[in-house]
Amino acid sequence: MCGIVGYVGKRRATDICVAGLRRLEYRGYDSAGVAVIGPDGQLKLTRVVGKLDNLDKELSANPLEGGLGIGHTRWATHGKPSVQNSHPHLSCDGRIAVVHNGIIENYQELRAELEAEGHVFRSQTDTEVMSHLVEKYYQQSEGKAADLRAAVVEAVHRLRGAFAFGIIAADSPGQLVAVRRRSPLVVGIGEGENYIASDMPAIRSETDRVYVIDDDEVALITEDSIELTDLNLQPITKDVYVIPWPADAAGKGEHKHFMHKEIHEQPDAIYACLAGRLTSPDEPVKLEGLNLTEDEIKRIRKVVFTACGTAYHSGVVGRFVMEKLAKIPSEADLAPELRSRSPIVLEDTLVIAVTQSGETMDTLLALRDMREKGAKVISVVNVVDSTIARESDGVVYIQAGPEIGVASTKAYTLQILTIELIALYFAEVRGAAPAEELRAMKEALLACPQHAEELLKREDSIIAIARKYYDLRRDQWAKHGVVIDNGDQRAAEKGWWSTTFRRDAMRPNSLYLARGVNLASAMEGALKLKEISYIHAEGYSAGEMKHGPIALVEPSLFTVAIAVDGEVKDQMVANIMEIKARSGPVIAVATDGDTQIESTGVDPNASPEDVASQPNDMIWIPRCPELVSPILVAIPLQLLAYHMADLRGEHIDQPRNLAKTVTVE
Ligand code: F6R
């Protein structure tokens, strides 16, 4: 969500801050700002509503000189997006500036206290209490200059909640103070210059050496020193973390969008995730970081997967695979629901938290609740050293590299792969499944990189399907002589539709149906489509279709039916027939070589205009065991969503209202 970048050195701070914030744009934001201490010792501020381009324009017109600065992109929580509410926030005298990620829970009582003391607030944000608190404690004493770090620490002692702060003061030239609690923060190490950032990609092009700051640690940073202390100002030492991915990993390369690039990275990413863990179908799975003894694994009585959004869908696959392979009763719970339900935790329950960012607040809070109740928690995480990784008893990294597109793609397939490896490992330790079954699973997982490659080669066939469906309703109107698009002057002149209404009203609707282990694929396929194309999509159990959703079926609602080879295929065939019988168009996902599905439900006697008379549109996936199929099914469904959104001209990497990392409840 929000992003922080700070700089101290000899270059113009705003250049570094804005460039860093650009690399965090994918996380979503609605306003931005920078504050700088100028060569004249004055603190200067520029803030804008909207995109960083607006900030760039302001800064080109009125450059802010100075080598000490902090920048921020804000995603509104307290108070609407406005210049007043955007960061940095200043003290009353305008000589202290603060940027903040997170939420200050007790800000109302602190604000009342500070206002009673005469502080004047200019925004509705929780953050502003920090600039006034630091101002309150930033006092000269016994002839000594005011100490910014000491004031920050004193202020932090008053706060409840989650925060990462970057703070500068005109009267402490050359000093940047940063501190965190439950919100990510790194200090980048340069030569004659140093940086802070909420996320490593923001400063990766400047340095690959960082300190990952832990809760309640404070950094006092100048251009040639970094002092790390705890909140009692006792020095701490910490290892330098070397960022393992290259500086250009956060670029789009030849792809139009990050999402497209990340979909195409999947063959290599799957290969990298398997490397060292599964090398041959005849070797046992090796997993580092689980931190569970064989005895503990044998004693597990229940597994609870918990996560949000796409990561939850990989948990839905996980519960299935864990029961089938390791024979451990398993469930998957949405993290906020798990907390609300406050479940009874049996002895020897293992919670598996799944998260790309490792910072999702709901998942973090569910993890903490479950640990408090006595469960052991391991996590499946992408971002190394993230809060969830660090608060878990064990962590298995999916090793996807940075995922920039807001819609999760490669992280999803790698989450499933990692969970399948964990299930296989448990099955081996517990002797829970016949060796032949495990061998077949391993063979299929080892074939995944090559199968993923093959699926990407079939992208043109997905584009053809996307073209057919992305504007299905408009196309259907056109057959009746009504052209509904931006060129439809007649409709506009008559005032039938405003441009926005016309586009929204004419989106098709869709249903994604599946059963068994691919129920997650239907839910995930639908989520991908709705979040980036804004086409309404429901992911549903096909077994539930007759209990409600079938009422929606008609020619302008297309159904993606996942009918790959496996135990539930025959039932899916029956569902496809029911949809076709009601003139619903079907896109079927089936296994290579299936000769039945394309013509399933086709009625040769129906009129040629009736969808029922036409063959189903086909998405083919390579043959694999049913338990592995969700990894492969995901890839063409990601492409389908991507191309529909692209044809509709949407902002694919930053869909409206969404943020990459959801650090609020
Ligand atoms: C959808 C998407 C989200 C995330 C969810 C959890 O494409 O990306 O649904 O999966 O916000 O995020 P993480 O995995 O970071 O916990």
Image (cartoon, rainbow, N blue to C red):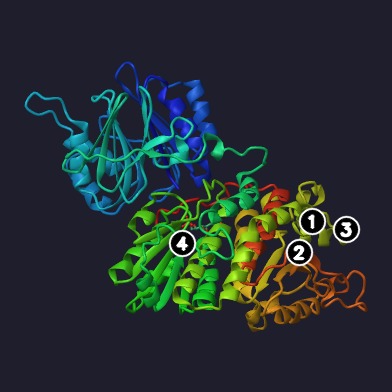
Nearer-the-camera pick, 274 or 489: 274
Mark 1 or mark 2, which has the lower sequence index? Answer: 1
Does any atom of ligand 1 lie closer than 8 Å to the CB of label 4? yes
Instruction: State the mark number for residue 589.
Output: none
Mark 1 to mark 3: distance in Å?
Answer: 29 Å
Mark 3 or mark 4, which has the lower sequence index? Answer: 4
Instruction: State the mark number for residue 354.
Output: 4
Q: Which residue: 37% across, 46% down?
A: 184
Mark 1 or mark 4, which has the lower sequence index? Answer: 4
| Left or right: 514, with 386 as reference point | right
From the image, tell me which residue sits under label 2. Answer: 620
From the image, tell me which residue sits under label 3. Answer: 481
Mark 3 to mark 2: distance in Å?
Answer: 35 Å
- x, y percent for residue 658: 52, 52
3 vs 2, front mark: 2
Q: Are marks 1 and 2 in contact (CB under 8 Å)?
A: yes
Amino acid beneath label 2: Trp
From the image, tell me which residue sits under label 1. Answer: 461
